[in-house]
Image (cartoon, rainbow, N blue to C red):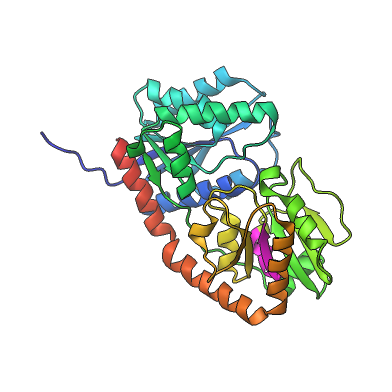
Amino acid sequence: MVLQTYNNVAVLHVVAPGQVGGLESVVLALTAGQAARGDRVHVAAVLDGQPLGQHTFLESLAVEHSVIALPARAYGRERAAIADLCSRLRPDVVHTHGYRTDVIDSGVARRIGIPTVTTVHGFTGVGGWRGRLYEYLQRRAFRRFGAVVAVSRPLVTLLCNDGVTPSRVHLVPNAYAPRPFLSRDESRRALGLGDGFVAGWIGRLSREKAPDVFVAAIAKLDGVVGAIIGSGREAPRNSPQVLMLGQIADAARLIPAFDVLVLSSRTEGTPIVLFEAMAARVPVVATAVGGVPDVVSEREAVLVPPDRPDALARAIASVREDPGSARARAAAAATRLATEYAVGPWVERYAAVYRGVM
């Protein structure tokens, strides 16, 4: 019996992308890293009822891609388009990202004999009955994948408890691809910020990200301005201390504008914005949820319990009152990011996952 050794891989990633977000950032970094490794990489981007104008994710892709633009809920046409791509590209692996492609598209590949892999970026646990139904279907679908990648240890436990065979679950925390930032002065000018102490928040305005907790914490502080970059359905109540800056393309480059980057989340996977703050050497205050404590300890950030505006406020105040310690934590965080979350080893771990299902 001769065992075949797979070096480079032909992989088709399938994603229903928003304009920006953690999932989108992971797909961009992973596909670029795989292409640099020599893999044959193609991305199928499903735009369900979205306008075909400017799309930040598509413009940022560094690999070949196909756009599957469909009316809302045209699932049969979507599956037919994925089947056609699989037939033409003949990938070794189909890698889906997010509940839509996990549920709708992965079965197409399996029916024609192509192994499937998914990355579980996290669960929201919110979104009304429809969101809960989609999440339920996704978690059931995981049992049919050749490999399920979890980006944090709590997700590994959750997947195994959901009935996914433990040998098929792989812990692969996200990585960070270095990128340029604007200077503090440039980024403050771009955001229209003054010279005071600014606590920044970047993310989707949704319950699991807890912008309401951030606003409540800022309200407990004198002389601190909060700045929120992001959009979504769960906009927090208006506050005279908090600037709502809306959705900003490539917002990460503006992180140096902040004196502290705050993650107030109720749930998380491994948040990319945390990596971005670490790379920019901006002090971090974060809730100890999901994969956050695996990425930063008290040596690199100030960690607090979720849903505790009082604790979050005290943590933000500690950064303002002791900037020397905050800078030391930020420097330690940057060192840890560079040594433990580089793209090269991350891409190789995915290659090993693919070889396991091929």
In percent of width and height, residue 76 lies at 55, 17
Q: In this view, does 357 lie above or below 245?
A: above
- Residue placed furthest toward the bottom: 324
Closer to the camera, 305 or 188?
A: 305
In the image, residue 221 lies in the stretch drawn in magenta:
no
Q: State the residue at coordinates (74%, 53%).
A: 213
Location of residue 331 by image quarter: bottom right
In the image, residue 255 lies in the stretch drawn in magenta:
yes
Q: In this view, does 276 lie above or below 3?
A: below
Residue 214 visible (yes or no): yes
User: Would residue 232 appear left or right of 75 to someone viewing this image?
Assistant: right
Count the marks: how many?
Answer: 0
Closer to the camera, 317 or 200?
A: 317
In percent of width and height, residue 162 lies at 46, 32
In percent of width and height, residue 225 lies at 81, 66
User: Would residue 301 appear left or right of 237 to someone viewing this image?
Assistant: left
- Residue placed furthest toward the right: 240
Magenta residues?
Answer: 252-263
Q: In this view, does 317 lie above or below 293?
A: below
User: Would residue 212 appear left or right of 52 to someone viewing this image?
Assistant: right
Closer to the camera, 155 or 260?
A: 155
- Residue placed furthest toward the left: 1
Closer to the camera, 337 or 84?
A: 337
Quadrant location of the C terminus in the rendered image: top left
In percent of width and height, residue 280 lies at 60, 69
Q: Is residue 178 above or below residue 234?
A: below
Quadrant location of the N terminus in the rendered image: top left
Q: State the residue at coordinates (52%, 53%).
A: 291
Residue 151 visible (yes or no): no
User: Would residue 34 appear left or right of 194 to someone viewing this image?
Assistant: left
Location of residue 45 by image quarter: top right
